[in-house]
Image: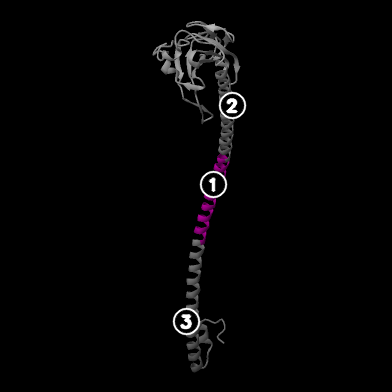
Amino acid sequence: MIGQLEQMKLLLNQTDPARAGRMTAYYGYFARERATKIDEIRARVGRVRELIEQIDQAGEKLRVLQVDTAQEMTDLERAREERVQALAAVTKRVSSGNQELAQLKREEQAEESLVADLARVLQDFPVDTQQSFEGLRGKLPWPVQGTMSARYQDIRVNAGQSGSRRNGVLIEAARGAKVRAPYFGRVVYADWLQGLGLLLIIGHSNNYMTLYGHAEVLYKSVGDWVGPGDVVAGLSDSGGAAPQLYFEIRDGRKPVDPKIWLRAKP
């Protein structure tokens, strides 16, 4: 009814004072209602702007979180790959260690089988001497001048795993050193054996045996008689690491600690 007229124009356009008064009152009602609506709309617009700002802030946080998550996923994938590689390497080492341990077991079994056979042969193989080998504890000369680098019952370690225990000792010597028999006896074995290389075994009285492994050359043959100080073998004189003689003493088939039998010093 009022149309788009302002209040002043509305007053000027009315000829009837009573009607003009009513129209003015109506205009006041509409004006106040419109002002209230405008205030509500402005409040809603302000709230919408606050929400948009909060949404923008939340979106920024989500973008940062997305970047961090992507980096963490990349790191996780890299760590997973490294773990897989490490696991494969460990599995390979374990497999290699198991193979080496099995090889050590086979070598030990070969030596034990040989010693068992020789122990039976010694019963019919005359090696008696005037003095008993059993009474030479702590008196035997060292078979070679050097330093004991591995002791009796030391664990042979392979690929990070524990292997079998040594039945003898390793004596590190000079290149080309000569190996000498510590006492009277008779050669009962002179050949190559897996794990010990060239091996010479001397049978002594009372069913004792001395074993000399890792030799470069053997100077005695099966059946030869030897006496204290006789050269029976030679160690390598080539370059590289210093040669090591493997020395073992057996009471029949039972290994004993050579250190108990040898003199305190070479």
Other residues around mark 3 within 10 Å, as few (<14) / some (14–19) / many (≥20):
few
Q: Earlier in the sequence, mark 2 or mark 1?
A: 1
Dominant secondary structure of the residues highlighted in magenta in the image: helix
Answer whether labels 2 and 1 touch (C-beta < 8 Å): no
Q: Which amino acid, by three-letter code, is at mark 2?
A: Arg
Of residues 186 and 42, the one drawn nearer to the viewer in this rendering: 186
Q: Earlier in the sequence, mark 3 or mark 1?
A: 3
Is 114 magenta? The answer is: no
Q: Measured from the top left, where is residue 134 in percent x and y?
A: 44, 15
Q: Residue 175 at what x, y percent from top left?
A: 51, 9
Which corner quadrant holds the N terminus?
A: bottom right
Q: Residue at x 54, y 8 (%)?
A: 232
Mark 3 to mark 1 CA distance (whole Å): 58 Å
Note whether 246 is above or below 89 in the view shown.
above
Judged by depth in the image, the label closer to the viewer, 3 or 1, is: 1
Span highlighted in magenta in the image? 55-83
Q: Quarter-wise, where is residue 257 in the image? A: top left
Q: The residue under label 3 is which amino acid type?
A: Arg
**At numbered mark 3, what does the secondary structure look like: helix, strand or loop?**
helix
Q: Position of residue 202 (x, y in %)?
A: 53, 12
Q: Which mark is residue 71?
A: 1
Determine whether 128 is above or below 22 in the image: above
Distance (Cα) linking label 2 and label 1: 52 Å
Q: Position of residue 190 (x, y in %)?
A: 59, 12
Q: CA distance from mark 3 to mark 2?
A: 107 Å
The residue where tag 3 is placed is 32
Q: Are marks 3 and 2 in contact (CB under 8 Å)?
A: no
